[in-house]
Image: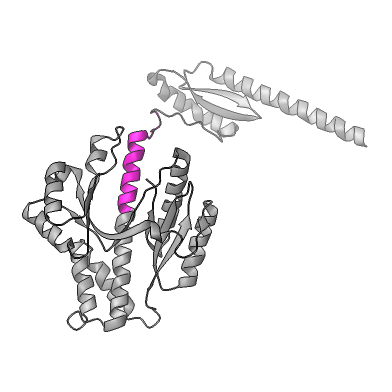
Amino acid sequence: MRASSSSIRALGTILHRFATATTTALFKSHFSSVPSPYSYHSRYGRIWKRFSSASPSSSNLWNSQLHLYNEYYEPCSSVRKIWTFSPLCMGRRACKIADRKGAQNLKKMKLYSKIGKEVVSAVKKGGTNPVSNTVLAGVIEKAKELDVPREIVERNIKKASDKGQEAFIEKAYEVYGFGGVGFVVEVSTDKVNRSVAAIREVVKDCGGKMADSGSVVFRFRRARIVNVKVSDADKDQLLEIALDAGAEDVIEPPDNEDDSEEDQSERCYKIVSSPEGYSGILSKLRDEGISFEPDSGYELLPITPIEVDDEAMALNKELMSELLALNDVDAVYMDQK
């Protein structure tokens, strides 16, 4: 019985191949006299269509005969696509532009989120009326200076009025990165347990380690920062203006020779100021007609930046990027040079 089944399968295979060959031969003999813009070949018992270099003038005659084939044979089930253009390759410049735009969008998103949380906290403490709630009035004025859309403020005022909305709590977590680099992660959250769990998961996945409170933060100092684009001011002029206005320091941006002109223009000088001298520096810059980007609060600056190798630098940047992607995280600082 087993031998009989094998014989039947073998005979079926032979008949299938014979039928396929006969079908292809009949088709070729029937249409051999018709110039065709296509060429056909048999594969696995099916007819496959490919383009050939036939002249366009013969296409009408071919189309008039093609319906005869479609009546008796199975239509093509697969047609290969022929690309008439080369694939779009993203080069280094395009990648850098995308990275820069992504960083700018992330920075803007974090700013909007932080202002929104401050609005909610202010409303929770003193109500929705800016006249009687001086804290809310200050946040609204700050939002105007930072060009935060009015809809963001209004939406968060309404959000704070909901009964289920809790007040936001500000927390700071410390992390060890690679090459001895330390991180300070600033968080503003209405669910502390959720934020801690998310940060721990990211740090673990990226190969970092959570640090005890006070282990890293002493490496930083808190200051007010005014950012001035390199293209908006002369270095010597800005240094003179800033120091005359009482600035503590002017930090130059790192110079990368591989950066394009557009990348160079996005680099910023950081004017470091004490809380008392911050408003005076802004007034001086306005008087001199120099454009600037005010900060959204205090920033942490490393006291002694750490220099690491390229591998550790890349891993630390990846960790920082993953932490910033968390909704509850407002800012991440590291003392990497």
In the image, residue 118 sits, relative to residue 161, either above or below, namely above
Q: For residue 102: magenta?
A: yes
Query: 177 or 14: nearer the eye?
Result: 177
In the image, residue 248 sits, relative to residue 275, either above or below, namely above
Residue 90 left/right relative to 134: right
State which quadrant residue 114 falls in.
bottom left
The answer to whether residue 28 shows anywhere in this view is yes
Q: Main secondary structure of the magenta part?
A: helix
Q: Residue, x 30% and y 71% (percent of image)?
A: 118
Residue 115: percent from left, percent from top: 28, 67
Q: Residue furthest right?
A: 1
Look at the image and tell me in which quarter the N terminus lies: top right
Residue 69: percent from left, percent from top: 55, 29
Residue 177 left/right relative to 9: left
Q: Which region shows up in magenta? A: 86-105
Residue 210: percent from left, percent from top: 51, 59
